[in-house]
Structure formats: structure tokens, C-alpha cells
Amino acid sequence: MRRAGRLPFFIVLAAALAAGAAAAGISTFLMKQVVTPENSKTQKVEIVPITFMYPLGEQIVNLIEPGRFLKVGIELEILAKGSPNDTEHKQSSNHGSGGHGEGAESEKPLPPVAASTKAELDEKRAKILDAVIEQLSTSSFRELLTPQGKRNLRERIKKAINQLLETGEVQHVYFTTFLAQ
């Protein structure tokens, strides 16, 4: 009779151990889901390019032909490539350009990466304007009368400025005014 008494005890003991092991396994599984959410395993970071407009103002230059000149307003679309932790280029005050619309740009704050790039543009403004004037003054009147000539001039200006920049890149050159005489 003792055997019969032991058998139910071992069955109850085995069931209790199995239930405890199952509870421990389930709680461990649930804790892993709480601590590490599923979406963090395959989370992708989307890099959004930051672009902003940078006005160069109006420039008046002589063309190659004697007696011919060009008056052109230029605005650059800049892709910021700097680091937000970049301490070399701090956001500086605007330098006067003699152009239009510069005050509108300073009204809304730029993200840190763009601010770093804008600071570089401000610091190198004289070099940028010199490169632009060089490209403008080596143009001919006939060349500038055609749409292809204006596209070529845009590309030459873009290339000349991009050679000067470290924390940004000119994406597009826009002519806001264009008068050749």
C-alpha cells in the first residue's frame, strides 16, 4: 500500500516541476520581448539629405567681347555634408552680399549639419565670388544667348564652387536675374 501512496506523490511532484519549468520558460520569453522590441532588431535609419538656398546676390561683369557685360543674380542650392559635431565651422553672422533675400534665410534656424556648411560658405564667400566672377567673365555674349550656353555656365560655376567646399556641395545654380548686353 505504500507504493500506491508514493505513485500519486511522484506524479504530483513531476507535474509541479513541469509547470514550474514551463512558467520559467514563458516568463523568460516574455522578458526578452519586453527588453528588446522586435523593431529594434531590423531598424533602418533613413538619411534625409539637407539642402538649403544660399544667395550670392547680383554680379555685374564684363564679357570677353569689348563693350559687352552681364548682370546676373545667382542663388545656390547647397547639399549639406558636414558633421553636426563639427566645431571648426560654427554658425557665424551673415556677411553682406549686396544681394536680395538674404534676410529671409536667417529667419529660420538651420539644422546643425546645414549650419556648419553655411558657416563654411560665409567664411569662403570672397573665394566663391571670385570663382563665380572668373567663370562669368570668361563667357561670350553669343554663348550666353542660347539655353545650352546658360546650362554650361551653370555647370562651370557649380564645378568651380564645389572645388572650394569641404562640408557641402552645390546641387544647382539658379539665375534669378540675367541680363546680357
Image (tube, grey):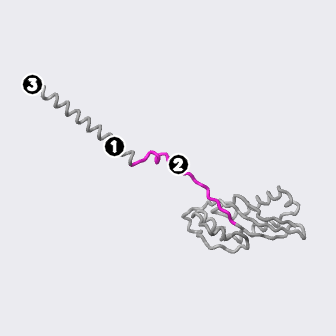
Vertical side of 129 occupied by 48: above or below? above
Dot placed on the residue nearer the N-terminal end, 1 or 3: 3
Q: Position of residue 81 (x, y in %)?
A: 62, 60
Query: Camera-side residue: 55 or 161?
Result: 55
- Disc number placed over residue 44 in the picture, else none: 2
Which residue corresponds to the image point at 63% horizontal and 66% vertical from the top-left?
A: 118
Q: Residues within 10 Å of mark 3 (few under 14, many from 20)?
A: few
Query: As drawn, which residue projects farthest toward the right?
Result: 66
Gap between marks 2 and 3 measured at Cα? 67 Å
Question: In which image quadrant can residue 26 be found?
Answer: top left
Q: Position of residue 20 (x, y in %)?
A: 26, 38
Amino acid at circle 3: Met
Q: Which residue is mark 1?
A: 28
Which residue corresponds to the image point at 62% horizontal and 69% vertical from the top-left?
A: 107
Amino acid at circle 1: Thr
Which residue corresponds to the image point at 77% horizontal and 60% vertical from the top-left?
A: 154
Q: Position of residue 18 (x, y in %)?
A: 26, 35
Residue interval drawn in magenta:
35-54
- Secondary structure beneath label 3: loop
Query: As drawn, which residue projects farthest toward the left?
Result: 1
Query: In the rendered view, does 53 fall on the left or right side of 178?
Result: left
Question: In which image quadrant can residue 137 be found?
Answer: bottom right
Check if mark 1's residue and mark 2's residue have beta carbons within 8 Å.
Answer: no
Amino acid at circle 2: Lys
Query: Camera-side residue: 105 or 85?
Result: 105
Dot placed on the residue nearer the N-terminal end, 2 or 3: 3
- Secondary structure beneath label 2: loop
Gap between marks 1 and 3 measured at Cα? 41 Å
Q: Which residue is mark 3?
A: 1
Q: Position of residue 13 (x, y in %)?
A: 20, 34
Query: In the rendered view, does 145 fall on the left or right side of 127?
Result: right
Give the position of the N terminus as an image quadrant: top left
